[in-house]
Image: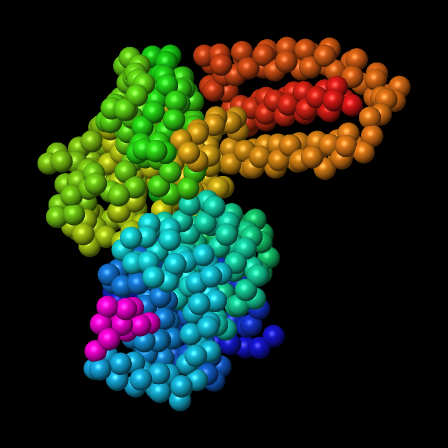
Amino acid sequence: MTNLISLENVSLAYGLDPLLDKIQLQISSGERVCLIGRNGAGKSSLIKIIDGVILPDSGFVWRKPHLRIARLTQELPQDTNISVYEFVAQGLEHLGKLLSAYHKLLDELTNDHSEKKLAELERLQHEIDINNGWKMEQDIKAILTKLELNGDQRLVDLSGGWQRRAALAKALVLSPELLLLDEPTNHLDIEAIEWLEQELLSSGVALLFITHDRALLKRLATRIIELDRGQLTSWPGDYENFLRRKEELLHAEAKQNADFDKKLAQEERWIRQGIKARRTRNEGRARALYAMRVERTKRREVQGKATFNINEGDQSGQIVIEAKNVTHGFNPRPLINNFSIRIMRGDRIGLIGPNGVGKSTLLNILLGNLVPQQGTATQGTRLQAAYFDQLRHALDPEKTVMENVAEGQDFVEINGKRQHAISYLNDFLFTPARTMTPVKALSGGECNRLLLAKLFSRPANLLVMDEPTNDLDIETLELLEDLLSDYQGTLLLVSHDRAFLDNVITSALVFEGNGKIQEHVGGYQDWQQYKNTSSKTVEKPVTKAMPERVKQSKKLSYKEQKELNELPEKIAALEKQFAELQDIANSENFYQQKPEVVKQSLSELNDLQLQIEQAYQRWEELDAL
């Protein structure tokens, strides 16, 4: 393995406490390193130092000579009024500008054959020739083909997910030895995230990436590094190993700090003794006390964890929302086609599908914010809905953090108890000074925490959350998971975070395209398992049964005849068992049980459904023979 980059005693500070405090880091070829840490810890600043965008206050950064580094930022492209080809070519700097100009001029020559343009084309061709640029032209076209991008399409016409894909193409066209990724899954749907995983695994390029997506972390990372209070620590192994060893380290740190504080208190008592003690004072001991005081003032405490709670409203009616034969969209292909559902109190439903498929449209129809073109959507009684909007329309960027939540009041009421707004916001990791900051000055993670604070300050028995996990650090994400798992109301959730879906929802509405929406029990992995099993079941008659029928008409063996005779009874028993378990799942108190009990029951229900489908398929195969 070749050493690509080394950081020695690197420091960086923007305030009183340094973001980076004499850190050490080394990255070698072939490594896939995940950088984790709290929002605002300095992760993006560290990546910018490695990329050379900003310089550290002190320390040394060594890069392998002629090292090719590419960086994919959190933000979507700003200059979108250019073609995809021009945008991707920007990754090649000067040569990319020449190729972009050449590509653009070729398009213009279809309508304008002036001598001036022809002369400019000849000049560009000559300059590209002497810089060996035609190979780079082929590289751009190859990467566009590989990522299924249309080079002539305008960037502004692409969705957020496809703009993200174009940004990745721009980063990869340089054939980097080290690729820096800052939250690469933002704006991507699940299908695109899984594609990205596979692309990065197969590329062989060394990675340093920041992510809150634990599924991506587990799939990609060969090493985890954590930035905490200015210090960088390295943790080989998987994410579970990191969590266990980090807990052990924090426990040891807490004990060491407690022992230090105890000794400091003893020395402080000694220094405050009377006249007699001062006559015999040990000057060395006094100097040691002063040194301890200085050391104590420099200590950076562990940042507290968010401790927010959901403000639950009064219990809603048994039926929360009922939709019948809903159709909505644009001809000839509707986003939603003849969809019906009955959502019961306590349901936790995830909406899964690509960007732009109609998930937010369905949410707005179910909430009564949008009237469907056909069909009806009826809300139940005593409904108190709270809507988490991924575009953050609920926040006023000109108002302060406190004004957005408290709306001119000093107190908020949470589950019947009054709490000062500053204390309440402290639970969401906003310091008193930060509560007076305008929203427009907050980071993406802080905006999401503020939106959660505003959402949870209102009583609600129906939570509707559209991409709540973007920009949240992993600790806050896991706390939100725990809260939603214990939430007694009804939850509708749109998310592309596979681990979050698996840990929170109990059923899924899967958008399968052309307006078709299918309901499945369980989480994301349960749906994937069902999809894989179903595809194998469908393939069986094609690969095995059908060729045999073409080759010969055969008699059933004794064993097959016996199996065929027993199948109707077997199917009847399975369907009876399925109906009984489904009745239990539909009961009023089913979701009041522990989440693991609910998940186990739903998993059994899913397995029975698969067994029934496989039994019917086998019956058709044997009957055809």
Q: Is residue 109 above or below residue 156?
A: below
Numbered label tally? 0
Q: Is residue 331 visible?
A: yes
Q: Residue at x 70, y 31 (%)?
A: 541
Residue 254 shown in magenta: no
Of 186 and 23, the residue lying toward us: 186
Residue shown at 58% from the left, 35% from the top:
531
**Residue 528 or residue 416, whichever sits in front:** 528
Judging depth in this view, the residue of 250 and 390 nearest the camera is 390
Quadrant of the frame with the N terminus: bottom right
Find out whether residue 111 is within the magenta segment: yes
Residue 424 left/right relative to 520: left
- Which residue lies at the image location 20% right of the left edge and 38% below the top edge? 394
Where is residue 117? Give x, y as percent. Answer: 23, 79
Determine the residue located farthest toward the bottom in the rendered image.
Answer: 130
Q: Nearer the viewer, residue 258 or 239?
A: 239
Instruction: Report whether 96 appears left or right of 614.
Output: left
Please determine whether, in this image, residue 43 is positioned above or below residue 394.
below
Question: Would residue 308 be visible to someone looking at this image?
Answer: no
Q: Quadrant of residue 584?
A: top right
Residue 35 image position (x, y, % from top left): 45, 60
Where residue 344 appears, as percent x and y from the top left, is: 40, 17
- Residue 578 percent across, percent down from the top left: 61, 15
Q: Tell whether 589 sits left or right of 111.
A: right
Per the rendered image, the range of residues in magenta is 103-114
Which quadrant is home to the C terminus?
top right
